[in-house]
Structures are given as C-alpha cells and as structure tokens.
Image (cartoon, helix red, strand yellow):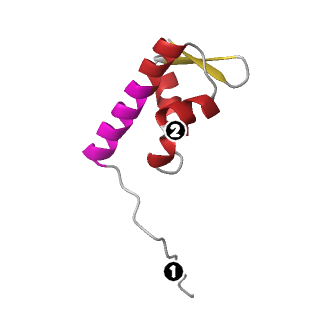
Amino acid sequence: MSRRSVWAPQMVTSSPRDDLDLDREIDAIVQLLREKGPLGPTEIRRELETKFWGPGRLRAALAEARRRGLVRRIGRRRYEAG
C-alpha cells in the first residue's frame, strides 16, 4: 500500500479574527446597500474596494449576509438590504 501526500500552500483554519473580518465585511455591504439601494456584485466590489479583502471574501460575505437575512437577492445579480 502506498501513501499519497498532498501539499497545500497554507493551512485553512477558522479563527475569531476570521469571524470579525466577516462581520465587518457584512456590515459594510449592508450599509452600502442601505445608502445606495440595490447593487450588483461588480458595483459592490468597486464601491467597497473588496479586492483588498482577499479571494472569495465578497462572495462569502454576501452568502452569509443572505443566510442571516440582512441582504436579499433581487433579480439575477442584484442585492438589496433586507
């Protein structure tokens, strides 16, 4: 029986800091949508400069905000504050 190893560039973990970042990101999205009205992901990304959040962070924050009922999707690719 041979063993197979897998290399990953960094360990994926969840920490309290991650949760604080997510909460901050969600708050920013909700506040933006309350101020500007319905927006698409491209507009949210531009307004909040989410490129500095890290890969996949906007998508994760939007999904969690929807799960919490803070944001709802309207149409195909637009979101509004819930």
* Image position of 66 (left or right of 42): left
Magenta segment's dominant SS is helix
Q: Which residue sits at x=47%, y=16%?
A: 69
* Disc 2: CA contacts within 10 A as few (<14), some (14-19) or many (>=20): many
SS of the residue at dot 2?
Answer: helix
Of all residues, the one furthest to the right in this rendering is 76
Q: What amino acid does circle 2 point to?
A: Leu
Q: Which residue is mark 2?
A: 58
Tell me what residue is drawn at x 29 percent, y 38 percent. Answer: 20
Give the mark nearer the N terminus: 2 vs 1.
1
Assign the N terminus to one quadrant of the image. bottom right
Q: Position of residue 30 (x, y in %)?
A: 45, 20
Q: Nearer the viewer, mark 2 or mark 1?
A: 2
- The magenta region covers 15-28
Q: Mark 2 and mark 1 in contact? Answer it, CB < 8 Å.
A: no
- Above or below 34: residue 46: below
**Dot 1 crowding, Cα within 10 Å, few <14, some 14–19, many 20+:** few
Q: Is residue 73 above or below residue 22?
A: above
Residue ID for mark 1:
5
